[in-house]
Image: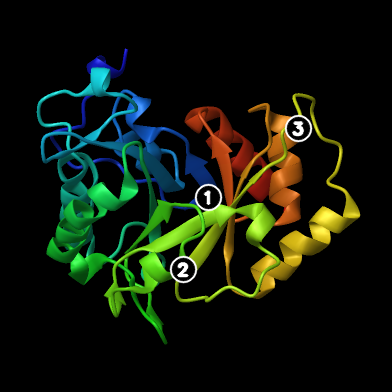
Amino acid sequence: MLNACVPYRHMPVINSEAYPVHSHNDYAHKHPLYDALNNGVNSVEADVYHFLGPLWVCHTPFGIVKLRRIQNWYFRPLKRIIDKNGGYIYKAGETFYVLIEVKTNTRHAMPRLKKIFARYKDMLTTYTNHSVQVKPVTVTILSGRDDAYWMQDSVRYFGVELPFSHASENLNPYVYTQFRLHTGSPEPYKDLNSDLNKQIKLVLARGQRIRANAGQDIEPNWEVMYKSGVTFIHTDKLVELKEFMKKVKSEE
């Protein structure tokens, strides 16, 4: 049950290497954030529900639990880790990704989120309409298309993730920082078709990132996603994917 999930009250043991892995619904693990860090995950996902002021980490209002707020479960512990680690999560020069999906009206929740981001701005990647300054933590908001809404602030502490179908468009790189690819097949993949592989390489060459969900959360699909070069392999199986990544790395 989600209500049984609790964060550690002490510093986690952080894996020595970050892997191209995204922890889907990270808050559903026994120790949100820290289980991900212990397994070398470099991107975590938190659903937030805006209710009576606070932003609760949950999928529906039935998951609202005292103290389970986005700043308590993610931003505060990340800040503590960065301060203790000398300015980074895994290694100097690398950034750790936090994907936020707002389960209520995004426009109602964003003013509250922006206040939280501003409080932790020293550690958050910063965007203007002409530049990006990468910092230890990069926040991305799961979104649909709305250029004007995201561009209204001259300084932003978050990027936006869009469906992969938008990846070929001429988008402003200082707003759209990541795309999500869902292959949709329930069967294991042998390979991605050549057109999709070409599009993946084109997006990556532009310096943008791809979070890929291959349908079944199994090793054959992880292997195809890894070989395609996607930035984050979407998973619920943190330990198993870590072992897969260690095996693949040892064979390279």
**Identity, as a three-letter code, of the amino acid under mark 1:** Tyr
**Identity, as a three-letter code, of the amino acid under mark 2:** Asp
**Quadrant placement of the N terminus:** top left
- Identified at 82% across, 63% down, the residue is 198
The label nearer to you, 2 versus 1, is: 2
Instruction: Measuring from the top left, give residue 139's x and y in whole percent.
Output: 35, 58
Q: Earlier in the sequence, mark 2 or mark 1?
A: 1
- Other residues around mark 1 within 10 Å, as few (<14) / some (14–19) / many (≥20): many
The colour scheme applied to this rendered structure is rainbow
Q: Which mark is residue 220?
A: 3
Residue to which mark 1 is pinned: 19
Instruction: Measuring from the top left, give residue 84's x and y in whole percent.
Output: 17, 58
The label nearer to you, 3 versus 2, is: 2
- Identified at 47% across, 35% down, the residue is 24
Instruction: Measuring from the top left, give residue 245's x and y in whole percent.
Output: 61, 42
* Distance CA(mark 1)–CA(mark 3): 17 Å
- Other residues around mark 3 within 10 Å, as few (<14) / some (14–19) / many (≥20): some
- Other residues around mark 2 within 10 Å, as few (<14) / some (14–19) / many (≥20): few
* Distance CA(mark 2)–CA(mark 1): 31 Å
Q: Which mark is residue 147?
A: 2
